[in-house]
Image (cartoon, helix red, strand yellow):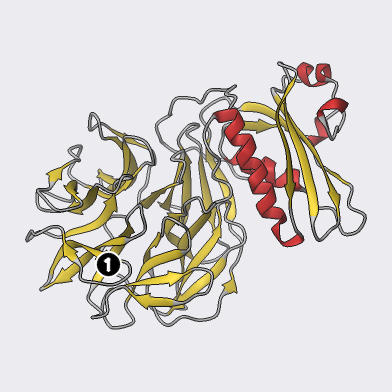
Amino acid sequence: MKLRYILGGRASPPSRRTRRPPSQALWLAVLALLPLAASAQLDIVITRSTQRAIPIAIVPFEWRVTLGLPYDFAEIVEADLERTGQFAPMGRETMITRPTRFSEMRLTNWRIMDVEAVLVGHVSGSEANPTVEFELVDVFAGESLLVYRLQSSRDAFRATAHRIADLVYEQLTGARGMFSTRLAYVQVTPGREEFRLIVADADGQNPIVVLRSTDPIMSPSWSPDGAWLAYVSFEAGHAEVFVQEVATGQRRPLSPDRTSASAPAWSPDGRFLAVARNVNANSDIYIYPIDGGSPRRLTRHSATETEPEFSPDGDRVYFTSDRGIGPQVYVAPARGGQAQRVSFTGSYNARPRLQPDRNQMAVVHQQDGRFRIGLMDLRDESLRLLTDGPLDESPSFAPNGRALIFGAGTTAGRGLGVYFIDSGVVRLLRAPEGILREPAWGPYEN
């Protein structure tokens, strides 16, 4: 696995022992819906690490199922936790013993190796419906932090492992895990004129193509319940917003009159979509009821206004506008009212995305000709640059706000980058072929 360092700010480290490019608005397109299909897996590349991680041992779970090939749940859990940069899993080859429960552990052995937490477990029952039992042990306190039993199935082994990682992450950091969530992104294959909208697990595995096109696909946006994706299609000869059910592939245009629109964003309650609607060669923000009905115009300005984003409480809408000198972020009341400028650092800030439950906002910031992802504090308007570019775009937060995914444009090509807020670690996800862009991190679905 290649290690490469890039620029970025370092965030404050988490508590170690907690118990409990540029604006993309108007250049889009899609063809007709084709059957769902699997896509190539993504490669994960480490690009930066900035802090000491929590030493943890994830012991391989004992397989007590009478039939079927063993499945390595611990390997998935280890990969999930290590990816965040907040954990340093112990190598299996250095484990003196491999206990399956707390009562089998000799804590002295683990303390000598400076391991702070140990995850042990076993799998029993039938191959079709196995039971996974596991414990998370605090080595120095000498106590169990978690004791869990989960029912699984052969086709849900990875999902079960991600769930275990979520529980461990929450117990040791105090923040809800994000490993059981999903990503949506667009894969472009140059030379073949093929564009694919893909849904995958948060680690890039299990990718499924939900839409193919010979024209560009852009701006995927998850509904709050994770059941629907909104995106833009050019199949009618102009930019048009569609809404598609992920599970079935059923889709429909947002507007019955097939109005030119782009950059869809869901309201927190899932009842509305804010879009950039192009009328008479001018783009303004409109809010559409998702179940039909007339749209409501939010902005009225001769400038281009695009890339809307609802605040977490749904009371405000942030958007990009060039009504001043260069693109900047503005905010307006969702029910209508005067817009106010929000971003002031530099001459280019676009594509606002709000961090869940925090007073921060990710933006695409241009500086010295480089497009980089920045994190802006809404309280004091300060901006911290997270990436080095030169063509980074489309930031999207994980639902716990502790990571964000973005389109990473580097000298090595285009892929997806994941920035972990607490550790400062960046991961790059690249496909064996093609360009990855336009990522959207899905919500919690249960």
Identity of the residue furthest to the left in this view? 302
Percent coordinates x, y for residue 302 in the rendering? 6, 61
Q: Quadrant of the N terminus?
A: top right
> Within the image, what quadrant is residue 120 found in?
top right
Q: Secondary structure at mark 1?
A: strand
**Left or right of 107 in this view: 52:** left
Q: Amino acid at mark 1?
A: Ser
Q: Taking 52 as reference, is 368 left or right?
A: left
Residue bearing the label numbered 1? 262
Q: For the point 49% across and 37% down, which residue is it?
A: 5
Residue 98, position as x, y percentages in the image: 86, 33
In the image: residue 227, left or right of residue 327: right
Looking at the image, which is closer to me, 382 or 73? 73
Q: Position of residue 432 (x, y in %)?
A: 58, 63
98 vs 40: above or below: above
Q: Residue at x 17, y 70 (%)?
A: 278
Quadrant hosting residue 340: top left
Of 263 and 191, the residue lying toward us: 263
Decide: is 362 above or below 199: above
Q: Position of residue 407 (x, y in %)?
A: 41, 54
Q: Looking at the image, which is closer to me, 395 or 193?
A: 395
Task: Name the side, left or right, on which 222 lies relative to 354.
Answer: right
> Vertically, is 172 above or below 327?
above
